[in-house]
Image (cartoon, helix red, strand yellow):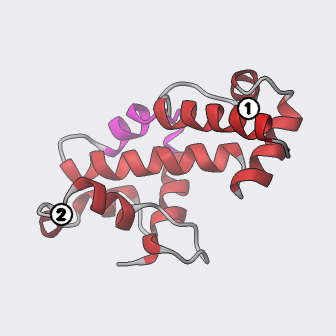
Amino acid sequence: MNLEDLVRLRRARDAMDRDYAQPLDVPALARVALMSPGHFSRSFRAAFGETPYSYLMTRRVERAKALLRRGDMSVTEVCFAVGCTSLGSFSSRFTELVGESPSAYRARDHEAGEAIPACVAKIFTRPVRNGEAGAGAAP
């Protein structure tokens, strides 16, 4: 993969980070990267180790965790606020990445983490797929 392709892929990944709540799909992201959808998907996975959809859902779950910790929105409201259109798919993916359902996560006491700076909390609360190691695997 050449440097120009990596720059284009990074542009699409930045769009996912910024516009995670918008309706994004592979064809739209491929246009941002100036690639065909198939080439974009293969190149994204090769460069970042996961599919564009998986990356986008991880961003959405990250944001959902922050909204659920606040406690002022229902799980359904959070689902739609982060750009998901199906509560069932959102709940399944959230549970897969976090290890508990969105409602259980929302109901849990989060006061202990309030004193931790957001930039540090983000590292330790990043959703991690089952079986992956990393900082997000901490309790």
In the image, farthest residue toward the front: 3
Magenta run includes residue 71: no
Magenta segment boundaries in residue numbering:
75-89
Residue drawn where x is 53% and y is 32% of the image: 85
Residue 31 on image: x %, y %: 74, 21
- Quadrant of the rendered structure where residue 35 is? top right
Residue 105 on image: x %, y %: 31, 62
Q: What is the three-letter code of the residue carrying label 1?
A: Val
23 to 106, vertically: above or below: above
| First-in-chain label (1 vs 2) | 1
Residue 10 relative to residue 116: left or right:
right
Residue 36 relative to residue 81: left or right:
right
Give the residue at mark 1. Answer: 26
Mark 1 surroundings: few (<14), some (14-19) or many (≥20) residues within 10 A: some
Q: Quadrant of the C terminus?
A: bottom left
Pick the front one: 36 or 82: 36
Of helix, strand and loop, which one carries label 2?
loop
Report the predominant secondary structure element of the magenta stretch.
Answer: helix
Of helix, strand and loop, which one carries label 1?
helix
Give the residue at mark 2. Answer: 116
Residue drawn where x is 73% and y is 41% of the image: 6
Magenta run includes residue 87: yes
Mark 2 surroundings: few (<14), some (14-19) or many (≥20) residues within 10 A: few
Residue drawn where x is 34% and y is 53% of the image: 65
